[in-house]
Image (cartoon, grey):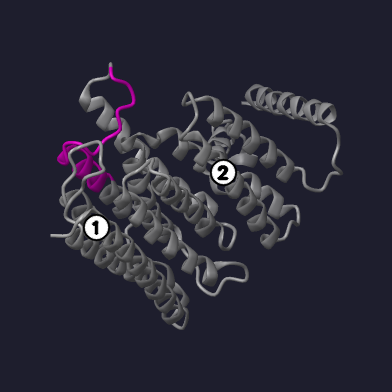
Amino acid sequence: KLDKDGNMDIKYLILIANVIFCLVSSLALSAYVRNHDANKRPACLISCIYFAFFAAVSATVYFLPRFYDFTTDVHARYFILPAAAFMLLAAISLIVKHRLFLPLAALLLAVTVVFGLPDFHITFAAVLPLWLNRVLTVFLWLAAAFSLRLFNANDGLVAIETLGISFGIFILSLIGALPFLVGCFSLDAAAVSFAILLYGAYPAQISLDRRGCDLLGLLLGWLIIFAAAEGAGAAVIIFCLPLICETLWSLAKRFTFLAAYADVYANPVYCQAAAGGLHPKIINTFFGRINVVLLLFGGFQVFAPNSYSLPMLCAVITVWNLYRLQHWQEQPRNLRDINRRFVSDIKDGVRNIKDSLRKD
């Protein structure tokens, strides 16, 4: 039996081994898949990577059977079963091509895990019944999974977002805000995302389709649920703000029912910037810088006196930067002029909606 110091040594040794295994496996698989037919790249890549991730999770749970730093009663099945389900779902998606298969399978997976594992859910409010907290947890998981596809129009942007969120969760575990195992698996996901970024950044050597994004999003949603269930929900919200803001903005434009916004995948701010001529590398750099800033604020959130001040500030910062990205062709102006332009844009949008309703 190892003593406390021995446990610490083997813990970090396993962490390093895990990361190296996931990184090397993902890089090797990406290099291999790059040489295959383009239509097979996305699903094949994610399926193979999920096999490597499942192996890493299984090895970690085997060598570290004591889950002593969780606030809830967690067992090995909380990690093994979802990781196995991810691998199985990715493998089946190679065979079943129907467009409804993955959404329905993801819904079944989320419902089974959240309702089947007693403590795997977020308590949004103590006054809510348990079943409603679980329903909201399933909704959040699927929202995180399927909103990631909105970032797939720019080479490498999906990997940048998954890398930022998963690495942020690892930082929280590093400073003691989350259990070690959550941080370990988050760093594994970050290593996978980094490998995809190396091969998927502009000009992309490999690519992800919507199925590949959804499969990657399921893993990301699983990590987000674990982190939020362990009390780090406010910090995770900060890490996810670019994803949240772009998703809400795209859906808000879509539900104006204007013909110009009918395609929800063309509504994100970065898509408008790219359509205006902004280079994909600049867009990736822009989101990378935002994620770095949010990582810092997310770390500070752990020591904040409340759970809303820093997320609100970061939301304002994110919206402000997205607005700058949307109007990247204009010269920088003072705060008053930008606020005036922002209000003017809102009024123009409302006026367009009214005109469209009158025509109908």
Q: Decide: is 203 above or below 292.
A: below
Which comes sooner in the sequence, label 2 or label 1?
Answer: 1
Q: CA distance from mark 2 to mark 1?
A: 29 Å
Mark 2–mark 1 CB contact (< 8 Å): no
> Are there few (<14), some (14-19), or many (20+) residues within 10 Å of tag 2?
some
Which residue is found at the position 54% from the left and 32% from the top?
Answer: 255
Question: Residue 57 vs residue 188: left or right?
Answer: left
Quadrant position of residue 242: top right
Q: Decide: is 142 above or below 63.
A: above
Question: Residue 3 vs residue 318: left or right?
Answer: left
Secondary element at image label 2: helix
Amino acid carrying mark 1 in the image: Asn
Report the residue that reaches farthest toward the top: 127
Q: Position of residue 219 (x, y in %)?
A: 35, 53
Secondary element at image label 1: helix
Amino acid carrying mark 2 in the image: Leu
Q: Where does the magenta region start and end? A: 107-126
